[in-house]
Image (cartoon, grey):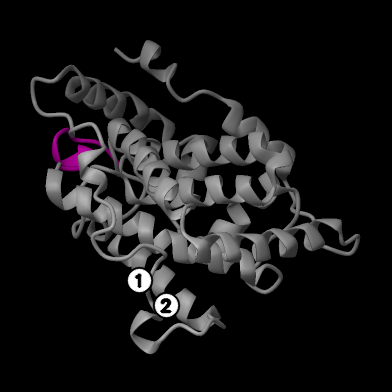
């Protein structure tokens, strides 16, 4: 997740056209110390906690999904670069999103993502919970070397995906159901992948939601959001704008529940 915050910061700097002073160029919308999400989140599960054992069962049971189309989607969802996130949510929004055709959308989400990512990092360092493959043996959909610099709880990928889902819903409320559905599936990809526990996915969504509740009170955020809303509305109404492909297949895939696999596990 630290890499995620860095991506947001670099992207924000490259896209920024605001008059922020140089020492504020990489900042989110919140001032340091304005919020502490670790006081809001439910504590991370500990050994002996029923949630801890549920996480273990889910990790073990969902290893069977890695060689399925749902596992392939989880592997694809590992890429959290800006262009990948815009691609991942294009079907949900109903138009192909790219950094080139929606820079204002990307700017507001990237800047808010610095805030949500920083809060999740704060909670990770507070709880220091081990990732699931360090507790039980099982395959993971990405190299574990990419995960060693960060803890399990909350999930940073989920925080990032839910930040996209909530803000895209603000920008295109008529597509809220599709956007939030894809955002939930993006989070579920993390425990399908095996990189996170299911409780960490829930906490990532909660962390993003709580942080954005504060971000939404900031005047600069509201200004940027309105600009992004106008930009996206123009793009969606443009008859020449490209439409994403494969949406029916994606919708069918994320409609399949991942939890019933537990009922089939030994």
Q: Are marks 1 and 2 in contact (CB under 8 Å)?
A: yes
Asked if the stretch drawn in magenta spans residue 132, the answer is yes
Q: Which residue is mark 1?
A: 6
Residue at image position (19%, 35%) is 137
- Against 16, residue 126 (above or below) is above
Give percent across and percent down for residue 55. 25, 26
Horizontal side, residue 169 vs residue 24: left or right: right
Asked if the stretch drawn in magenta spans residue 229, the answer is no
Q: Quadrant of the C terminus?
A: top left
Q: Is residue 259 visible?
A: yes
Relative to the observer, which residue lies in front, 84 or 224?
224
Q: Which residue is mark 2?
A: 10
Label 1: how many Cα within 10 Å (few below 14, some 14–19, many 20+)? some
Check the image and name the residue furthest to the bottom.
22
Give percent across and percent down for residue 246. 72, 46
Residue at image position (39%, 48%) is 159
- Against 207, residue 6 (above or below) is below
Label 2: how many Cα within 10 Å (few below 14, some 14–19, many 20+)? some
Region in magenta:
130-139
Relative to the observer, which residue lies in front, 83 or 132?
83
Give percent across and percent down for residue 151. 19, 49
């Amino acid at each position: 997740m630290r890499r995620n915050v860095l991506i947001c910061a670099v992207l924000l700097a490259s896209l920024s056209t605001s008059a922020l002073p140089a020492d504020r160029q990489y900042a989110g919308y919140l001032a340091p110390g304005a919020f502490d999400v670790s006081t809001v989140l439910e504590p991370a599960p500990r050994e002996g906690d029923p949630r801890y054992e549920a996480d273990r069962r889910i990790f073990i049971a969902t290893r069977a999904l890695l060689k399925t189309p749902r596992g392939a989607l989880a592997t694809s969802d590992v890429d959290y670069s800006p262009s990948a996130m815009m691609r991942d949510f294009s079907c949900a929004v109903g138009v192909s999103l790219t950094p080139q055709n929606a820079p204002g959308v990307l700017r507001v989400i990237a800047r808010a993502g610095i805030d949500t990512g920083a809060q999740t990092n704060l909670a990770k360092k507070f709880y220091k919970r081990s990732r699931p493959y360090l507790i039980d043996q099982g395959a993971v959909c990405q190299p574990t070397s990419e995960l060693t610099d960060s803890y399990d709880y909350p999930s940073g990928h989920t925080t990032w995906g839910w930040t996209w889902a909530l803000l895209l819903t603000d920008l295109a409320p008529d597509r809220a159901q599709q956007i939030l559905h894809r955002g939930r599936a993006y989070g579920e990809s993390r425990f399908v992948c095996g990189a996170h526990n299911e409780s960490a996915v829930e906490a990532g969504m909660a962390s993003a939601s709580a942080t954005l509740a504060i971000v939404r009170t900031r005047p600069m955020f509201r200004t940027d959001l309105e600009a992004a809303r106008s930009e996206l509305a123009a793009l969606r109404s443009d008859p020449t704008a490209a439409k994403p492909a494969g949406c029916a297949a994606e919708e069918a895939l994320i409609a399949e529940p991942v939890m019933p696999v537990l009922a089939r596990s030994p």
